[in-house]
Image (cartoon, rainbow, N blue to C red):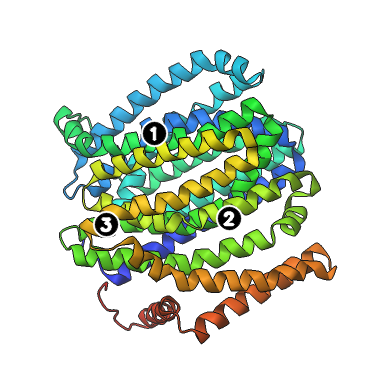
Amino acid sequence: MDGEVTKSKVLTSLLWKLMERGGTQGIQLIVMIVLARLLLPEEFGLIVLVTIFLTIAGVFVQSGFNTALIQKKDVDDIDYSSIFYLSLFVASVLYLILFFTAPLIAVFFEQPNFMTVLRVLSCTLFLGAFHSIQNAIIAKKMEFKKLFMSSLGANIISGIAGVWMAYNGFGVWSLVGHQLLNQFMITLFLWFTVTWRPQLHFSVKRIKTLFSFGWKLMVSSLIDALYSNIRNVLVGKLYSPATLAFYNRGDQFPSFLVSNINGSIQSVMLPTLSSYQDDKQRVKDIVRRSIVTSAFIVFPMMIGLAVIAEPLVKILLTEKWLPSVPFLQIFCFIYALWPIHTANLQAINALGRSDIFLKLEIVKKLVGLLILGISLPFGVHAMAIGIFIGGIIGLFINAYPNLNLLNYSIQEQWKDILPSLLISFVMGGIIYPIQWFGMSDMLTVTIQIGTGVVLYISLATIFKLECFTYLLETIREMLGRKKGIAVKELY
């Protein structure tokens, strides 16, 4: 990484990453809300089915090697160019596979429109290969401002186009056009924003070096993609695209909130931890800070969202989407655990132990498949609850290696997050009965959110939570830095 990693640089990078994910996904969420009001659940369900196969294919195009580029200390144009050409080749092979198997998949799901939609959206694999290197360079240099500007522009343009198409009766093709244009525009903007250009270099030796680290992450990502989407396949096949749309929409809202925070922390953590990989005590301090701070932010958001789920869905999506409420509430508890998973796994990756990472993924997925097999006969809601149970077990699995690597035990981690968890439940329990007062949905949600925020901050102040104090001090530091006051080095 260029230059010394200071607290100032980390906080600035995290701020831009939060703005990039929050801004772009915020626009995407608004677009999806508008499209959900204009389109049918069945049309969303079809796109979810197509996305299953694109997600799995995308693992081979973008995963593993990009992380290896970020983790490697001395990366040059030969590394970047070699991975770029390899990604394009892989994208070409996968596109042909999806193109010729699309009719068979359409017959399997009994969805005649599936074939054409998959063939068109598979073009995004090439676009992903083009901008994957730019994303790696941005993460390596922690220049997330560039990604923010490019992503924001792409989402605004594609969002307007998607809504226009839906309003004019294009149906499912408005969703296709939105996704395809989004990937094209982000590729175009990054091409001019990031100065790197592919050179006429291809080194098998460099590929092998990066492959020794990246293949384990790629396999881990593949296992995760297969595992994450197997439920979508089962719901789409055993039930209907509409049921799949309700299941997926319940996932979307908590995913939006947590992935912005968790994904931003993850993007900044890997290059930061990698720069300190030889100082395990420093790595432990950063991991602990990440877990404590993200838990303090995420826990009340997820519990609060679960409380206001029903009136919120009626306000944003209309009553035709009410079957998604139970799924939304279950996924809130699932996503509340994500930052803890991420911090532990990023520490393992930053220390160069992708072998441990792969073993953990295999163990967790075997446990998850066992739970899926048990829950499957009991219906879609039981399958979602099974994910939460698997997440609890996964916390212990992910934390176990860091007892030896960082001397950071699962007991210590739970002790760190317990205060935030407890006051979050207290806050949720107090604001839940507000919905019984007979007010309008809008007024109910407004009062619940306002009361929840005030109550949570008050409890954090009364009980003097260390993570709350840290956040306040960090904000003061950032404000002071804007006035020319020097900040301390990271931790």
Contact between marks 2 and 3 (CB within 8 A): the answer is no
Q: Spatial distance from mark 3 to mark 1, Cα to Cα?
A: 23 Å
Residue 415 left/right relative to 446? left
Q: Nearer the viewer, mark 3 or mark 1?
A: 3
Could you tell me which residue is drawn at 58 percent across and 44 percent down? 384
Residue type (three-letter) at the residue carrying disc 1: Leu
Q: Spatial distance from mark 1 to mark 2, Cα to Cα?
A: 24 Å
> What crowding class fits label 2: few (fewer than 14 Cα within 10 Å), some (14-19), or many (20 or more)?
many
Contact between marks 3 and 1 (CB within 8 A): the answer is no
**The quadrant where residue 87 appears:** top left
- Residue extending farthest to the bottom is 462
**Residue for badge 1:** 222
**Mark 3: secondary structure:** helix
Residue 362 left/right relative to 281? right
Q: Nearer the viewer, mark 2 or mark 3?
A: 3
Residue type (three-letter) at the residue carrying disc 2: Cys
Q: Nearer the viewer, mark 1 or mark 2?
A: 2
Q: Earlier in the sequence, mark 1 or mark 2?
A: 1
Q: Spatial distance from mark 2 to mark 3, Cα to Cα?
A: 26 Å
> What crowding class fits label 3: few (fewer than 14 Cα within 10 Å), some (14-19), or many (20 or more)?
some
Could you tell me which residue is drawn at 62 percent across and 79 percent down? 454
- Percent position (x, y) of residue 369? 47, 35
**Residue for badge 3:** 402
**Residue for badge 2:** 332
Name the image quarter holding the N terminus.
bottom left
**Mark 2: secondary structure:** helix
- Percent position (x, y) of residue 4? 21, 65
Q: Earlier in the sequence, mark 3 or mark 1?
A: 1
**Mark 1: secondary structure:** helix
